[in-house]
């Protein structure tokens, strides 16, 4: 597969090159030159497990990776998950895909348990002299999933930058207690956008990259700008759709819509790619928290970063500049000149506006604030005895709004375990708040929903990473770590 940049001035000839580079040299994002159409026959639907689905879908795009290598790495990646990799729960006319049964209890494990293994293959295949240093900015969940994924992977080092504020105690502990030989978590004074923007500058800073090269390192990214993050996420939309077919919940070919709690627009974009590849998805429902820049954009055509940034109780969606939106715009506008113009406006004016809203014909945007989020968790629990985390419930509430007008079933992406954001769950269930660990246990007592033992282990583990820096010092700390 060849990959082209959304900004039109750069291509790479192989999947391994795209995986290793992360961001394109012209500042754009790589997309596969063409998207294959994929569907599953009746016998496949009956016979295939998650790994089989992943193998067929990922293999159709990453078609230049050796088939046996790919199959093996996919098997190993998903062996780190619980036995039921992806349970699907039915709540009336909605279905919830629980994407949180991997190592760090968030959907990002689906891509980040595989990406490091593919990067390892790429290093070997390309006979690279240099080692790879993976640089990642995180709003919480990417960081822990990437650290776990890259931990002790040969010839790689990973440096994760996370904001000091706005992440949960479980998320912080997952990062600061990591004990790989090659894993580093560094706190940045500021918010996620600060860390992500500073990192994007590093990615296009040739002088700095030369400096790293002289130390025998090349940079790559584990953020969802990397195509290796996106492609594995297409799989679960397919898998869930066909599971619903198998269980006679929907007919094969029947359209459904998907609702995705959205921050950097990666997960929902994977759903859009599934649609482009032929999965019968009608609409995409983009669910935002109080940082509702995306739902505003969908409703008005104006993408305006000149607005207040809020710290919310769904911190993994506290993002104003959604990287993957650029890929979506490219697929819709099919014109890199327009993308360049929009992205220049974004950089210079922190604002852009579309002339034509027709690209939003199959996407809906809704947003909910913290209070609605807490009430939503309580309401879903009271109605179904089912617990959703603060992000997922926003997807649920968006689906509910959408279904007031549209009579169609909705598949909701449940992006994190409720236990990952225990203090908010405790608030919703009106549990006396003491500490996060006490809350976890009390939630388990009251709801009977099993607390994974790994949660406790993480909260009790020794802190090994405690560096806090100013964002202007990111380059220095990268060099120091290497
Ligand atoms: C990362 C994350 C999101 C947002 O996903 P994007 O792909 O960035 O849109 C939503 N919920 C949780 C729990 C996350 O970790």
Image: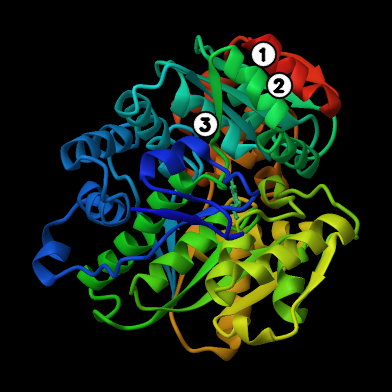
Q: Residue at x 71, y 46 (%)?
A: 315
How many other residues sit within 10 Å of disc 2, few (<14), some (14-19) or many (≥20)? many
Residue 340, placed above or below residue 255: above
Q: Are marks 2 and 1 in contact (CB under 8 Å)?
A: yes
Q: Secondary structure at mark 3?
A: helix
Q: Residue at x 44, y 32 (%)?
A: 103
Image location of residue 194, percent across then percent down:
80, 40
Find the distance from the CA under tag 2 to the CA under tag 1: 7 Å
Residue 470, placed above or below residue 100: above
Q: Which numbered marker is on residue 146?
A: 3
Q: Residue at x 45, y 43 (%)?
A: 18
Q: Is residue 442 left or right of residue 199?
A: left
| Of the pair 458 and 254, the residue shown nearer to us | 254
Q: Which numbered marker is on residue 186?
A: 2
Tell which circle, 2 or 1, labels the residue nearer the N-terminal end.
2
Q: Residue at x 68, y 31 (%)?
A: 206
Image location of residue 29, percent across then percent down:
57, 52
Instruction: Give the quarter of the image for residue 120.
Output: top left
Q: Secondary structure at mark 1?
A: loop
């Amino acid at each position: 597969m060849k990959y082209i940049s959304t900004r039109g001035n750069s291509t790479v000839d192989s999947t391994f090159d795209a995986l290793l580079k992360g961001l394109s040299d012209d500042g754009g994002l790589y997309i596969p030159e063409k998207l294959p159409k994929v569907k599953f026959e009746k016998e496949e639907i009956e016979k295939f497990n998650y790994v089989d689905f992943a193998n067929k879908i990922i293999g159709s795009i990453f078609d230049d990776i050796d088939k046996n290598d790919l199959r093996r790495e996919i098997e190993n990646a998903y062996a780190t998950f619980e036995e039921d990799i992806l349970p699907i729960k039915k709540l009336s006319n909605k279905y919830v895909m629980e994407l949180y049964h991997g190592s760090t209890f968030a959907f990002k494990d689906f891509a980040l348990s595989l990406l490091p293994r593919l990067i390892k293959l790429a290093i070997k295949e390309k006979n690279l002299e240099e080692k790879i240093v993976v640089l990642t900015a995180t709003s919480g969940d990417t960081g822990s999933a990437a650290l776990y994924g890259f931990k002790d992977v040969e010839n790689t080092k990973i440096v994760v930058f996370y904001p000091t504020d706005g992440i949960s105690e479980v998320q912080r502990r997952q990062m600061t207690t990591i004990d790989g030989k090659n894993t580093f978590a560094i706190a940045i004074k500021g918010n996620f956008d600060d860390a992500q923007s500073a990192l994007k500058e590093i990615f296009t800073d040739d002088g700095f990259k030369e400096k790293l090269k002289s130390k025998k390192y090349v940079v790559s990214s584990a953020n969802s700008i990397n195509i290796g993050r996106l492609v594995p996420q297409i799989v679960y939309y397919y898998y869930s759709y066909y599971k619903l077919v198998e269980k006679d919940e929907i007919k094969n070919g029947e359209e459904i819509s998907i609702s995705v709690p959205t921050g950097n627009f990666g997960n929902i974009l994977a759903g859009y790619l599934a649609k482009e590849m032929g999965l019968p998805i009608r609409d995409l429902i983009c669910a935002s928290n109080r940082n509702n820049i995306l739902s505003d954009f969908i409703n008005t055509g104006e993408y305006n970063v000149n607005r207040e940034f809020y710290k919310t109780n769904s911190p993994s969606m506290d993002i104003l500049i959604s990287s993957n939106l650029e890929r979506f715009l490219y697929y819709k506008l099919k014109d890199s000149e327009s993308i360049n113009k929009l992205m220049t406006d974004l950089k210079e004016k922190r604002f852009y506006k579309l002339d034509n809203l027709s690209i939003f014909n199959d996407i809906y945007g809704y947003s909910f604030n913290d209070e609605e989020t807490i009430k939503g968790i309580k309401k879903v629990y009271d109605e179904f005895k089912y617990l959703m985390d603060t992000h997922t419930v926003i997807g649920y509430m968006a689906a509910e709004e959408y279904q007031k007008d549209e009579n169609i079933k909705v598949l909701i992406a449940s992006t994190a375990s409720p236990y990952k954001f225990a203090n908010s769950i405790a608030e919703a269930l009106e549990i006396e708040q003491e500490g996060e660990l006490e809350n976890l246990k009390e939630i388990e007592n009251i709801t009977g929903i099993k607390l994974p033992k790994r949660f406790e282990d993480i909260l009790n583990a020794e802190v090994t990473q405690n560096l806090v820096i100013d964002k202007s010092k990111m380059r220095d700390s990268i060099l120091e770590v290497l």
